[in-house]
Every structure is written in structure tokens, then in C-alpha cells.
Image (spheres, rainbow, N blue to C red):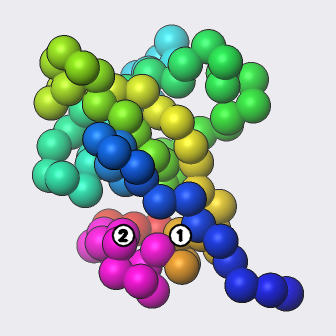
Amino acid sequence: MGPVRVRLPRGREVIGIIAQRVGAGRMLVSCMDGKTRNCRVPGRLRRELWLREGDAIVVEPWEFDGDVKGDILYKYSKAEVEKLKKDGLLKTQENEF
């Protein structure tokens, strides 16, 4: 098995961990910048992106209300999460698994 390639956040994007699913394609996400955002899954990703609590994701904050709302763009696999932790980009949570 070769090296793991990881998609890093670009521009305004931040890494987050899903804290709670609230329904209708929306989730509360604890972002690495210290904010909790109510994020939604855009329509183009609804059927291909299956998310659960504890998943690591990439969030793009909205232009307005960016501190409390955002869009989910990408979900990291287990191998990508391990690589992010090893590189120090993803802080480990105390209540993780």
C-alpha cells in the first residue's frame, strides 16, 4: 500500500468533527478554529456523502453568518484521519470512540 494522500483545507475552509446530527441534512460541527457551526450537506453531495457523528470533515463557512453556519464539502476516510493526526493537523478529542 502506497502513501496516503490527504485533501487539505484551502482558503477559508476548516477541518471539523461532527458533534450532532440535527436532521434535514444539517449537523452541528465542532471546527478546529474553536467555533461550533450548524452545517448543511449541499444538494450535489446528499446521496454520495454519508455522515455520522465523530466523522472528520472539511467545512466551508458561509460568506455571511460564517461563524455559525457552513457547508460540508468533504469527508475524510479512516486512513486520512490517521495521517492528519500524525501530521498534527487534527487535534485528538478526549471523548473520541
Region of the chain picked out in magenta, as a range: 84-94
Direction from residue 73 to residue 79 in the image, left or right:
right
Instruction: Name the spot of residue 17 as percent of width and height, x first.
Output: 39, 51
Characterize the local packing of mark 1: few (<14), some (14-19) or many (20 or more) Cα atoms within 10 angstroms: some
On residue 81, the disc is: 1
Magenta segment includes 89: yes
On residue 39, the disc is: none
7 relative to 31, above or below: below
First in sequence: mark 2 or mark 1? 1
Instruction: Name the spot of residue 46 as percent of width and height, x first.
Output: 66, 21
Majority secondary structure in the magenta region: loop
State yes or no: discs 2 and 1 in contact (Cβ < 8 Å). yes
Residue at the outermost right position? 1
Q: Can you tell which quarter of the image residue 49 is in?
A: top right
Residue position for label 2: 90
Q: Quadrant of the N terminus?
A: bottom right
Residue at the outermost front position? 11
Q: Amino acid at mark 1?
A: Val
Direction from residue 92 to residue 6 in the image, left or right:
right
Instruction: Name the spot of residue 65 as percent of width and height, x first.
Output: 16, 18
Q: Amino acid at mark 2?
A: Leu
Work out whether residue 10 or residue 93 is closer to the camera in this orientation and state it.
10
Residue drawn at the location 14% of the way across and 52% of the way down: 34
Q: Can you tell which quarter of the image residue 6 is in?
A: bottom right
